[in-house]
Amino acid sequence: MAGTADDNRYMTLALSLGRRGQGRTWPNPAVGCVIVAEGRIVGRGWTQPGGRPHAEPVALAQAGDRGRGATAYVSLEPCAHHGQTPPCVEALIGAGIARVVAPMDDHDPRVAGQGFAILRAAGVEVVTGVLADQAARDLAGFFLKTDQGRPFVTLKLATSFDGRIATATGESQWITGPEARRAVHAMRMRHDAVLIGAGTARADDPSLTVRDLGSRHQPVRVVISRRLDLPLTGKLAHTACEVPVWLCHGPDADAERISAWRGLGARLLPCTLSGRSLDVGSALAALGAAGLTRVFCEGGGTLAASLLQAGLVDEVVGMTAGLMLGAEGRPGIGALGLDHLATAPRFQLREVRPLGADVLHVWTRTD
Ligand code: AOF
Ligand code: ZN
């Protein structure tokens, strides 16, 4: 059954509440819930950090007795399984909710359709398919992890007009302006992890933390480094105890380096090789198995090219400055080994807007 205009309006709110949890609910999805009684919002909730409590009990607790006979808008099918907490369907039924509106089935096999079936069997009216496209975008990371065992990958490219990330001498600060930098920090916060290649870790000594946004939440910092030849004295090493550092390394990484990083507090994820490089597919599989749903890749060019070649980039966020660095500048994307246009990775424009002196453009994969 299709939803009404009101259903769309309240589901829009549930979706935006759900997005508040993005980056901090992994391995669980970031779900939102709104309870509406007689045209008034009586409860709001979203999945809490670490994935529990789920969105529904938070909203139901706010609604209290006003939940009786009300409609619950949930941005994903309510769960049906007994985990560490009782199923949300039981909480909804127990609170006397008369109608549940949701965009789509959960992909978790413990739920997958069961949640809706239990609600219907208890006499609750269930409406599905409301704003399903938007929900699928918001929850894409959770669905990819569940269905394919890997997180959603956003590739960020802050470049000159001609797609360069540094001059030939390696100067890279600052190509884009302060507004773009702030936007990058906000985007980092909505991802479970920030991902870079070893070359970027060596060249930039980045901290990859979220600063100046009044939040204490920090995404996991992931470095892909086949041999673990990363400085043990840099910012990542110094802060590995405070903000998680995970290292994806190859089978030939030095045992002493492995134990040195472990001693610093890093988590080590052994991966396989593809030719002479670390297989990015195996790295993403390791990250998915560790529970990550959304990864924000910040370079460099070699890692960006490997991900694109493997068809593992789901969204590209471009920030482009009005600056020319020429062919001698370092490219944001390394060689892709392409012969034909037809085989070039292609993306579809989803959003474009000015960002200070720069332009922000967001692209999604077309397949
Ligand atoms: C909901 N509302 O807010 C979320 C749901 O490990 P557990 O017991 O917390 O369950 C995790 C599963 O619950 C997860 O795989 C997904 O199917 C669902 N997440 N469900 O009803 C929520 N976050
Ligand atoms: Zn639940």
Image (tube, rainbow, N blue to C red):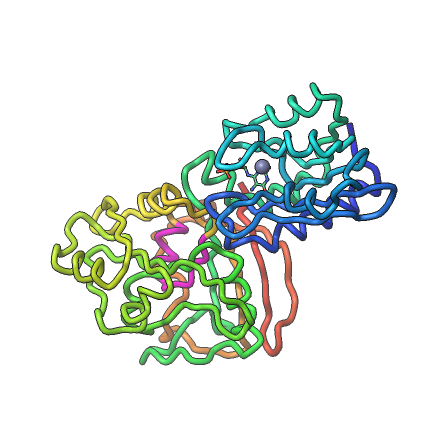
- Determine the residue located farthest toward the right in the rendered image: 38
Quadrant of residue 235 within the rendered picture:
bottom left
Which residue appears at 87% of the width and 44% of the height? 39
Give the residues drawn in magenta, as a range: 295-308
Comparing 330 with 210, the one in front is 210
When the figure is inspected, residue 291 is found, relative to residue 211, above or below; the finding is above
Which residue appears at 24% of the width and 44% of the height? 272
- Residue 357 belongs to the span the image colors magenta: no
Which residue appears at 28% of the width and 59% of the height? 266
Comparing 315 with 266, the one in front is 266
Which residue appears at 21% of the width and 69% of the height? 232
Comparing 305 with 224, the one in front is 224
Image spot of residue 32 (x, y percent): 65, 46
In the picture provided, is 157 more to the left or to the right than 196? right
Q: How many marks?
A: 0
Image spot of residue 192 (x, y percent): 46, 54
When the figure is inspected, residue 39 is found, relative to residue 234, above or below; the finding is above
In the picture provided, is 156 more to the left or to the right than 287? right
When the figure is inspected, residue 321 is found, relative to residue 223, above or below; the finding is below
Asked if residue 274 shows in the view, the reply is: no
When the figure is inspected, residue 215 is found, relative to residue 24, above or below; the finding is below
In terms of image quarters, where does ligand 1 lie? top right
Image spot of residue 214 (x, y percent): 55, 71
Asked if residue 249 shows in the view, the reply is: yes
In the picture provided, is 276 more to the left or to the right than 70? left
Q: Which part of the image, by quadrant, shows the N terminus? A: top right
- Determine the residue located farthest toward the front in the rendered image: 65
- Residue 304 belongs to the span the image colors magenta: yes
